[in-house]
Amino acid sequence: MPDTAYTADEMMTVAAARMLRNGAVCFVGIGLPSAAANLARLTHAPGVVLIYESGTIGSKPDVLPLSIGDGELAETADAVVSTVEIFSYWLQGGRVDVGFLGAAQIDRFANINTTVIGDYKSPAARLPGAGGAPEIAASSGEVLITLRQNKRSFVEKLDFVTSCGHLSGGTSREQLRFPGRGPAAVITDLGILIPDSVTKELTLTSIHHGISVECVLEATGWPLKVSPHLQTSAPPSAEELSALRNLQGIPNAG
Amino acid sequence: MMLQLREAIREMVRDGDVVALEGFTHLIPFAAGHEIIRQGKRNLTLVRMTPDVIYDQLIGCGCAVKLIFSWGGNPGVGSLHRLRDAVERGWPRPLALEEHSHAGMVAAYAAGASHLPFGILRGYLGSDLPKYNQNIRFIECPFTGERLAAVPAIHPDVTVVHAQKADRRGNVLMWGLVGIQKEAVLAARRSIVTVEEIVDELNAPPNAVVLPAWVVGAVSEVKGGAFPSYAQGYYKRNNAFYKQWDRVSADRETFQSWIERHVMSTRDFDGFKRILEQAVKHA
């Protein structure tokens, strides 16, 4: 059963990993991005440099850490610095090519919310908050975002703008003079969305193997634009799946 | 000054204080946090970049009225249920939030350590955070005209951190992920450092992170005092504890009975760990 031998989350992680180019300096956000960034390092991008906000530069963990500050990250790093340094000299200093972020909510211009669901002062659900994301989103050369796609996460209007993508689209990001270019792609469990080069609105450019366009539209809280050149992402290769499962400490079948 | 942890907390942490127990995943001062709970400190303003399980415990025990922070979660596991209960439902008491980003917090701590009135960063661009936090403002660079964010310096009344070693004079050595601990100690009016061990000689390499005895208020030896976080070179992070905390903290009564059994009914951190070990044996 080659088509069902992987999960939707595995497809998402593999697709996200493929977006990270070899040699890039990547600031790895908490959550889903860590698996994708390390998978990239263990497959097509051995020269990627992974920076974690806990202060590690060039981390090379064999097994995915539970937190972004596990000992494994420091032990395998090229350098370990204070958090003042990591945010001031390395991120703000312009040393990061790619910021890799997760999110709870995202809108059509790839702005993200990780703060609250509902009203800020009396929230329906309090989320962990900003962490490093606002400045990772602002200062990295470009940003990759990965999250699961459904109507609760892909919303018409964010309850709170924690970190900026392309703001209200068009040239609005340029006008605020962010150092970095902003989101380059959003990778989900259903497909890949890329901002339009002019309007900056997220456009479905690729669906994962076995996923229909209707399914993606149904999982999006706004009328999602679909590229006329829609592609289908290849399913995870045996090598990718094996590397991912090793990283997650999951025994490989067979 | 060498003090037992109990004395250090009694003398240096006062009701109503601004208290920072720092540690970025590594070297989190759990033993000191438990002692604050045992002594029933109240009306604290808690400061920390990454409030995690020990802050969840302090908040759930009603020690805090305000939290200044940038990321509050159980890393890799999910929500802090006691923090959420306080924010969403005011239990056991309402908790005011002053919310930053990590870059804002490090700028504020560095300003505190530098004795500057505010920290400066290229940050919060386009974010809603400044709408809800009056302590995030914007200034114009006098040289380039660039609009930059400013945050007031953090000056805790007392900072508490955990480190690997101190010598008998009270000089402190830490290594691995050292986070914001040095700045947090230097920014504070008083400080307490718990350490894994007290040794005759630190043998610190010249560029090591050393807090000289004369900037540290009290040093207390608490072996394993960062459990369930970790101390590099001594013990690993106990990820199972963090995962179990999700269940313990999800329910008010389960949380309260856990605190009663593990913290209030134990004399010190050794007692706490004995109770935990018994629980593991009987599991």
Image (spheres, coloured by chain):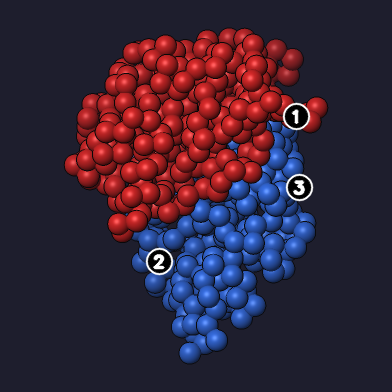
Q: Which residue is rendered at x = 57% and y = 40% of the image?
A: B231
Q: Which chain is blue?
A: A
Front residue (pair B265, B182): B265
Q: Chain of mark 2?
A: A
Secondary structure beneath dot 1 equals loop
Q: On the image, which quarter does residue B81 sit in?
A: top left
Q: CA distance from mark 3 to mark 2?
A: 43 Å
Q: Are marks 2 and 1 on the same chain?
A: no
Residue farthest to the right, as pictured = B206
Front one among B201 and A100: B201
- The CA span between labels 2 and 1 is 59 Å
Picture coordinates of residue B225 (x, y %)?
49, 35
Whether residue B227 is visible: yes
Residue type at mark 3? Asp
**Tag 1 residue:** B204
Q: Nearer the viewer, mark 1 or mark 3?
A: 1
Count of labels shown?
3
Residue on which disc 3 sits: A78
Label 3 crowd (10 A; few <14 / some 14-19 / many >=20): some
Residue occupying image coordinates x 33% and y 27%: B37
Identify residue for label 2.
Answer: A217
Distance from label 1 to label 3 (Cα)? Answer: 20 Å
Query: In the rendered structure, are the residues bearing label 1 and label 3 in contact, judged by CB atoms less than 8 Å apart?
Result: no
Q: Would you place residue A224 above or below residue A55 in this image?
A: below
Mark 3 against mark 2, which lies toward the viewer?
A: 3
Q: Nearer the viewer, residue A11 or A80?
A: A80
Which quadrant of the figure has residue B178?
top right
Q: Chain of mark 1?
A: B
Disc 3 element: loop
Name the kind of residue labelled 1 in the image.
Answer: Ala
